[in-house]
């Protein structure tokens, strides 16, 4: 088989790139390991007909590229969990709370102080080139935890920052680079990712997988499913070898793989510096759990369904009418792997009960993304020192070898997949480049 362009991976990034190339008349083929498109966006139809999202779900006002694409595809955008009435929940080790009455003025002042400092730093970072920041070395080696501790935090505020990082499936504040956090904020015009009202206030009606389905239709007939790629040789022409031994030929390769599986593909014909940079990127391991209920139990107690947790549950947010989502990040991985069957589910439900009383769940659906061979993670982790180690080749191309997908953007998210996917298509088509970042 021969094509002008082969896109490896039919996640959101690969699909966006292939769609724009196809609409411009390019002979493009997408090669996908799984039997479905969407990668880390995955919808599942539950027994009662509701579609449940087991992967990427929410976007926000600052995700311009995603919202623009949704509009182009004629999809409706609706409020996400942010539209729920009620107050936030806190499932702390020493007691569960609804609302924030238990926080002191000193706790709140501390949180404001930390956010202001992160915002101040973000305003000094160029998301396209954080490496040239005059203080890059120091800021990349500095953890968010160290920054917080330098600002004289209250004990409770410190614990809340850690619990919030856990609820987002993150590595925790002691293992997050300040420079990477600041770069993510700078990428969307200076809004910190902890500002859920701008990062997580929206979703596609029907769920994120609806957008994937719409994209897939525009690339119909061009996707080869069940076709894991084992090697790529970048030459004139390029070749892509499948696990079956079949060799595909193209002028241009778009590598739209997550950085974990990418390491398992033998790539030749690109510089060792580029491979070194790609292989140095790492992913956070996380599992997602979706609790399917009969009723919106959170409304009983004036809880809005959003909670952070210090227990082994990650936290909760409302996915749908009677559905709660949870992300269980790397600090809970051993517990999930080693606990007897049923125990993580029991603990997840116990957390909901601490917040709003007895619940009967129809099911708790688990998706372990860290051990899925075609994801091997969740989102890119930027531990202290990682941004400098990955270096300025991050997200750049070495024609005819192009990279695309959320791991190649400053802030991950589905926004990153859409932005890089579409920008890569423009570059290949020789169209004027668009910025990958939002102006402040
Ligand atoms: C649990 C979870 C929750 C998330 N929540 C959100 C959220 O609420 N909002 C948000 O914006 N983002 C969220 N994200 C992140 C978002 O889903 C991803 O960043 C984005 O979808 C990644 O798209 P991508 O195209 O870059 O990569 P992927 O979606 O990972 O696509 C890569 C594709 O490559 C394929 N592939 C892998 N190896 C091979 C191979 N050897 N040969 C051929 N094909 C291969 C894969 O099967 C996959 O289809 C979440 C992610 C997860 C896992």
Image (cartoon, rainbow, N blue to C red):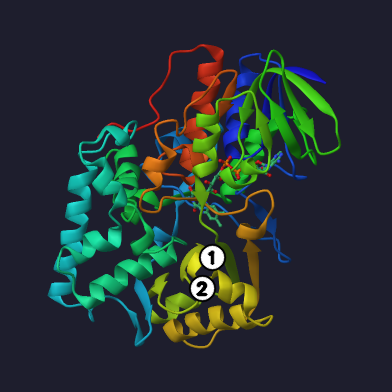
Residue 141 drawn at (x, y percent) = 30, 51
Q: Is residue 272 above or below residue 346?
A: above
Rendered residue at 58%/31% (across/down): 16
- On screen, residue 401 above or below 57: above
- Mark 1: give few (<14), some (14-19) or many (20+) Cα within 10 Å: some
Q: Secondary structure at mark 2?
A: loop
Q: Judge the density around disc 2: few (<14), some (14-19), many (≥20) Cα neighbours within 10 Å.
A: some
Q: Residue at x 51, y 56 (%)?
A: 284
Q: Can the viewer see residue 404 in this picture? A: no
- Is disc 1 in contact with disc 2, using a CB cutoff of under 8 Å? yes
Residue 425 in percent (x, y) is at 55, 22
On-image quarter of the C terminus? top left
Q: Is residue 201 above or below residue 155?
A: above
The residue labelled by disc 1 is 321
Question: Cβ of disc 1 within 8 Å of ligand 1?
Answer: no
Percent across and percent down for residue 364 are: 63, 73
Q: Which mark is residue 296?
A: 2
Q: CA distance from mark 1 to mark 2?
A: 6 Å
What x and y, as percent, mark residue 119?
Answer: 21, 48
Query: Along the horizontal axis of the image, is 163 left or right of 11?
Result: left
């Amino acid at each position: 088989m021969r094509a002008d362009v082969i896109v490896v991976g039919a996640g959101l990034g690969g699909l966006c790139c292939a769609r724009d190339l196809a609409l411009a008349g390019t002979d493009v083929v997408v090669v996908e390991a799984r039997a479905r498109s969407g990668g880390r966006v995955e919808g599942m139809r539950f027994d009662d007909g509701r579609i449940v999202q087991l992967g990427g779900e929410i976007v926000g006002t600052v995700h311009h590229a995603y919202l623009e694409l949704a509009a182009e595809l004629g999809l409706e955008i609706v409020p996400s969990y942010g539209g729920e009435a009620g107050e936030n929940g806190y499932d702390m080790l020493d007691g569960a709370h609804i609302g924030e009455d238990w926080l002191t003025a000193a706790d709140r002042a501390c949180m404001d102080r930390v956010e202001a400092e992160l915002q101040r730093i973000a305003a000094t970072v160029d998301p396209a080139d954080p490496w040239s920041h005059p203080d890059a070395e120091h800021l990349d080696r500095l953890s968010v935890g160290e920054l917080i501790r330098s600002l004289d935090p209250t004990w409770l505020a410190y614990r809340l920052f850690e619990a919030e990082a856990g609820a987002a499936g993150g590595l925790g504040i002691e293992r997050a680079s300040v420079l990477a956090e600041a770069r993510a904020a700078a990428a969307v015009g200076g809004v910190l990712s902890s500002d859920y009202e701008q990062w997580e206030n929206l979703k596609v009606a029907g769920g994120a997988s609806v957008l994937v389905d719409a994209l897939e239709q525009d690339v119909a007939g061009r996707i080869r499913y069940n076709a894991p790629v084992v090697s790529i040789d970048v030459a004139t022409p390029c070749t892509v070898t499948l696990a079956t031994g079949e060799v595909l030929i193209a002028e241009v390769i778009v590598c739209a793989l997550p950085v974990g599986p990418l390491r398992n593909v033998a790539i030749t014909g690109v510089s060792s510096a580029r491979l070194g940079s790609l292989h140095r990127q790492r992913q956070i391991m996380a599992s997602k759990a979706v609790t399917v209920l009969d009723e919106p139990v959170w409304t009983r107690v004036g809880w809005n369904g959003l909670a952070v947790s210090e227990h082994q549950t990650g936290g909760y947010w409302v996915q749908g009418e009677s559905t709660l989502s949870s992300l269980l990040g790397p600090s809970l991985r051993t517990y999930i792997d080693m606990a007897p069957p049923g125990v993580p589910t029991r603990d997840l439900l116990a957390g909901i009960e601490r917040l709003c009383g007895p619940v009967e769940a129809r099911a708790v659906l688990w998706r372990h993304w860290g051990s899925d061979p075609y994801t091997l993670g969740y989102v890119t982790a930027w531990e202290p020192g990682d941004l400098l180690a990955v270096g300025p080749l991050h997200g750049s191309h070495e024609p005819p070898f192009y990279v695309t997908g959320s791991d190649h953007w400053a802030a991950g998210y589905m926004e990153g997949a859409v932005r890089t996917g579409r920008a890569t298509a423009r570059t290949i088509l020789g169209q004027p480049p668009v910025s990958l970042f939002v102006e402040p």
